[in-house]
Amino acid sequence: MSLHAYHRARTIVETPRQAERRLMLEITSDMIRARDAGQVRGALMPALHRNREVWGTFAAVCGTVGNTLPDGLRASIISLALWVDQFTSDVVAGRESIDDLIAVNRDMIDGLTGVGAPN
């Protein structure tokens, strides 16, 4: 099976939640690799930029009319996205470590996986 056919088949069977989880796993893995390679400040920008973009997208989607997530969850995601945006600037400036961004992403991945969700 060609790579294109594989990607097409995956998008047919993958739910939006699974796609979000996969994307967060990829981005978080990129951030961990960059951290473990000793990258700091501006060298982290490729991984940080992608993370900032996805959180901005989550916030934008949560702010759209017709979004069916509970209001409290939508507000929490928007707040986290704003925090990610500001904190990313602090990481690039060398005032903070990337570790807190990685931790927030892991929490989001757990949420998308259903870890800790009521039965």
Image (tube, rainbow, N blue to C red):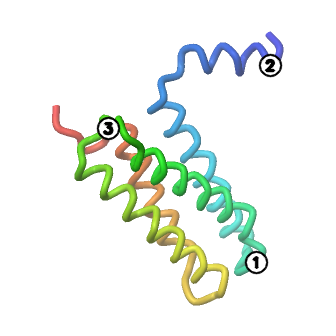
Disc on res. 4: 2
Q: Residues within 10 Å of mark 3 (few under 14, many from 20)?
A: few
Callout 1: helix, strand or loop?
helix
Q: Where is residue 59, by image quadrant?
A: bottom left
Query: Looking at this rendering, what residue extends furthest in the bottom direction?
Result: 95
Amino acid type for the residue under numbered disc 1: Gly
Q: CA distance from mark 3 to mark 2?
A: 29 Å
Tell me if 90 is positioned left or right of 36 in this view: left
Mark 3 / mark 1, whichever is N-terminal: 1
Q: CA distance from mark 1 to mark 2?
A: 33 Å
- Reply above or below: 25 against 98: above
Sequence-wise, the earlier of marks 3 and 2 is 2
The residue pinned by badge 3 equals: 114
Identity of the residue drawn at 32% across and 38% down: 114
**Distance from label 3 to label 1 (Cα)?**
34 Å
Quarter of the image with the N terminus in it: top right
Q: Which of 37 and 24 lies nearest the eye of the viewer?
A: 24
Q: Residues within 10 Å of mark 1 (few under 14, many from 20)?
A: few
Q: Is residue 74 above or below residue 15?
A: below
Q: Amino acid at mark 3?
A: Gly
For the point 44% across and 32% down, which residue is it? 17
Say what amino acid the circle numbered 2 marks: His
Residue that label 1 marks: 42
* Residue 107 % position (x, y): 39, 55
